[in-house]
Amino acid sequence: MTAALENRPAITRTVDARGSFCPGPLMELIRAIRESQVGDVIAVLSSDKGSKVDIPKWIEKAGHRLVSLEAREGYDELVVEKAR
């Protein structure tokens, strides 16, 4: 196991938005953030290529933390920590 994975906080919720197109994955993340507590960690699975740009931009603007962004087989996994 790599050091990055050892230090990654435990995922408390997964949003599977594979097959959904922009702005679907972002809207699903926003809903999950609203329903979550500060410190919760949400993984978003998205096959929409725009998510790699749109979601990190929104996270920064909204004041949350991007934990990781990793390409998987046919989709991306974005892990977000609710910061406020």
Image (spheres, rainbow, N blue to C red):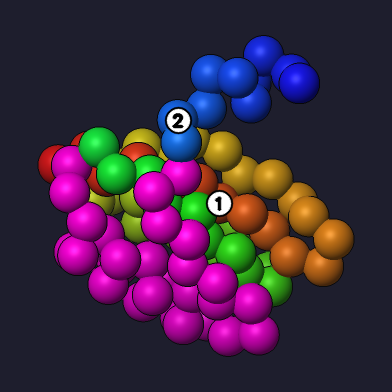
Name the element at disc 2.
loop
- Residue 49: x and y in percent read 68, 69
Is 14 in front, or is 53? 14
Can you identify the residue that label 2 sits on? 9
Q: Quadrant of the C terminus?
A: top left
Q: At label 2, which amino acid type do we have?
A: Pro
Q: Mark 2 vs mark 1: which is more N-terminal?
A: 2
Q: At label 1, which amino acid type do we have?
A: Leu
Q: For the point 39% across and 48% down, which residue is it?
A: 12
- Residue 34: x and y in percent read 18, 64
Q: For the point 47% across and 67% down, which residue is it?
A: 15
Which numbered disc covers residue 78? 1
Is 44 in front, or is 26? 44
Residue 4 visible, this orientation: yes
Please indicate whether residue 74 sits to the left or right of residue 52 in the image.
Answer: right
Q: Residues in magenta?
A: 11-38
- Residue 56: x and y in percent read 46, 50
